[in-house]
Amino acid sequence: MATRRAASLLRQLRPMSAVASSTEPVVLSSQTAGLAVATLNRPKVLNSLDLDMVRILDPLVQQWDADDSVSVILLKGTGEKAFCAGGDVVSVAKSGKGGADGGAFARDFFREEYILDYNLARLTKPYVAFMDGITMGGGVGLSVPATFRVATERTLFAMPETGIGLFPDVGGSYYLPKLDGQLGMYLALTGARLKGADVVKAGVATHFIPSDRLGTVEGELATLTGPDPGEVEELLTKFSADTPADAAFTPHLAEINECFSADSVEGILERLEQSGTEWAGKQRDTILRMSPTSVKVTFEQLTRGATLSLAQCFLMEYRITQGCMRNHDFFEGIRALLIDKDQSPKWSPASLAEVSDELVESHFAPVDNDLHL
């Protein structure tokens, strides 16, 4: 069940080449009065992020941030299905595993994506992200730095990277440990999905606004006369809808905090087993189906990230990506879930017990041509 769940999420990260080329720009940009809008425009691949989009967005948002005529920056996606379903991980895998470019794309994609995500977090103007639809992986990296993160009834948030031999990157080291209790560690290790208003309840989004109000919200944002976060907050709150008192995960919060506060992955699994509930058993089974190396690296990543700055987290994450490129599981996860689609990855090492401390630590070592922010 857990493998099928991961597969259903990760299929959204299919390669860009799976869709016929289009003359449509991959990023649309416009300005109405003081509102500057960037729209991710690859709806056939659920607005998945590729390197061209990264290279358009980074200078664009920095230009807007320096432009006195811009009061608010808005990022959204084309279509009703997705804000951004992730990054171009298939192309990364092809480059990293003996690609003709010597792995250059695998290095450049992560480096430039992280620089963009870091720069989004440093914008001085109010930055609004409409997380309308699937928001995973690279889409999380684009949205979580926003001053205002708007979820709708269509929002589906997840960081399912341990299921492809990767880890919850794009700043996950920094943002996930800041969620209440152990919710971040739970989301990172299991790839659990949050839907709709639950994304606000978890602290990932700041507002819940029904999707049929977004057009009106955008029009109202264009009427603001200055880069005043208080005015943006007031406007978004005016259009927000009531949310249920409890989230879907609320009944399990005590278990999440108890089980996922253990000081090792093995300790988490032991506490889940001891809990004895059906829910805890499902989480344990899910973790055991993920890449053992990714699970242990992710645990260490979030543990370290809890005490690091955002810049330090991105440096650490870049080094981890290159560690993944040196090892087996990322390429096997992409093969099994996104290329051959047999949904049966053969992880190596095959069990948590076989993942040595030395292997985990090697993912955090400095690399040639390190990330500089």
Image: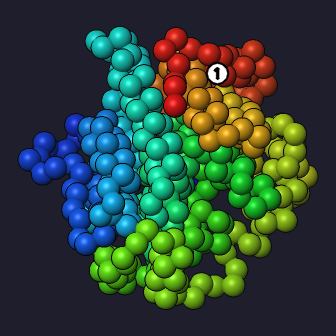
Using the rendered image of the protein, determine whether residue 349 is visible from the camera's viewpoint.
no
Find the residue positioned furthest to the front: 68
Q: Quadrant of residue 211?
A: bottom left
On the image, the x and y values in percent for residue 236 come to: 48, 80
Kindly state the secondary structure of the residue where label 1 is placed.
Answer: loop
Q: Quadrant of residue 80?
A: bottom left
Q: Is residue 11 left or right of residue 60?
A: right
Badge count: 1
Q: Please, is residue 35 above or below residue 141 in the view? A: below
Find the residue positioned furthest to the right: 274
Q: Quadrant of residue 301?
A: top right
**Tag 1: residue type?**
His
- Which residue is painted at 80% across and 59% down in the image? 181
On the image, the x and y values in percent for residue 122 come to: 51, 48
In the image, 83 versus 337, the foreground residue is: 83
Q: Which residue is mark 1?
A: 363
On the image, the x and y values in percent for residue 326 come to: 53, 15
Using the rendered image of the protein, determine whether residue 54 is visible from the camera's viewpoint.
yes
Q: Is residue 248 left or right of residue 147?
A: right
- Which residue is painted at 63% across and 85% down in the image? 244
- Which residue is painted at 52% across and 25% down in the image? 372
Q: Please, is residue 158 above or below residue 10 in the view? A: below
Find the residue positioned furthest to the left: 23
Q: Please, is residue 129 above or below residue 287 in the view? A: below
